[in-house]
Image (tube, rainbow, N blue to C red):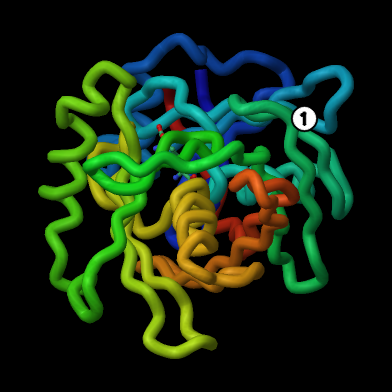
Amino acid sequence: MTLHFHKYQGTANDFVMVDDRARTFPADDHALVRRLCDRRRGIGADGLILLRILPGYDFEMVYFNADGHLGSMCGNGGRCTVAFARQLGVITDKAHFLAADGPHEASVDADGRVHLRMMDVAGQQELPDGIFLNTGSPHIVRFLAASTLAEYDVYGEGRAVRYGDTFRERGGTNVNFVEAPQAADQPWQVRTYERGVEDETFSCGTGVTAVALAAARRGAASPVPLRTLGGDLSVAFQRHADGSFTDVYLSGPAEHVFAGSIAL
Ligand SMILES: N[C@H](CCC[C@H](N)C(=O)O)C(=O)O
């Protein structure tokens, strides 16, 4: 069998995208997904996404981490899936789709930027490891001192939290390290260790969403500008007196890189 695929990236978080409307992709084959995402033996990506038909929605997004296992929500992948659905003609410039954490709405603007509504977030917890939030995927947010992020050991410290006592029982977490802006119009800088990729990635959409909501508690106003290694994102939200957030929108680019085929 030959698999036709597309490669997408959103702020350099990259995905193998498969049109699985015919439901032929062997989704239970974790080793295959892992191989397709392998940067030396396969196509190379942080994750693989299937676009499927689902009654009541424009499409369903099925996201696998690079380790071959089904993941939770992926914010950058969600934006890329919306762009892919538009390329396929499944949608025009608005989408209503289902992902692992529930329904999502999205729109594509004239510049091709995708605005993706993320799930409502009930609150955030102060843990010894940092602030914990679930934005569709679990995230720890740790604020660092000024001018320390560039040299920070994201891999080593991220792994220590991800495999530490607190999260071993909970299935792990993603870990975000943040430097606050020095001036009001500057972005919050973020580097993320990603569960399921088990490495630092260039950007994480649910991660910057978690950072923006944690930053809101430190006085950041919506929309919050964020800078990752792979580019800039923005997160808008409504904050409520009980500490919850609704109308959370992740905005940023989603770009088609190339299409190809590979023998399975
Ligand atoms: N890169 C993704 C996050 C995937 C989450 C995944 N690593 C997990 O929690 O298993 C994003 O843009 O939101």
| Residue in the foreground of this view, choosing between 35 and 109 | 109
Task: Answer left or right for 31 relative to 153.
Answer: right
Indicate the amino acid at tag 1: Phe
Q: Which residue is mark 1?
A: 59
The residue located at (29%, 47%) in the rendering is 130
- Residue at 77% across, 49% down: 106
For residue 62, which quarter of the picture?
top right
Q: Nearer the viewer, residue 27 or 226?
A: 226
Question: Is 23 situated above or below 89?
Answer: above
Report x, y in % for residue 39: 28, 44
Q: Position of residue 91 (x, y in %)?
A: 85, 44
**Front-most of residues 176 and 64:** 176
Disc 1 is placed on an element classified as: strand
* Residue 76 position (above or below residue 42): below
Left or right: 137 as drawn, with respect to 78? left
Q: Position of residue 60 (x, y in %)?
A: 71, 27
Which x, y percent locates residue 89?
84, 44
Left or right, 217 with reference to 45? right
Residue 196 sits in quarter: top left
Looking at the image, which residue is at 71% across and 46% down? Answer: 246
Q: Quadrant of ligand 1?
A: top left
Reply above or below: 220 against 59. Answer: below
Residue at the front extreme, as displayed:
241
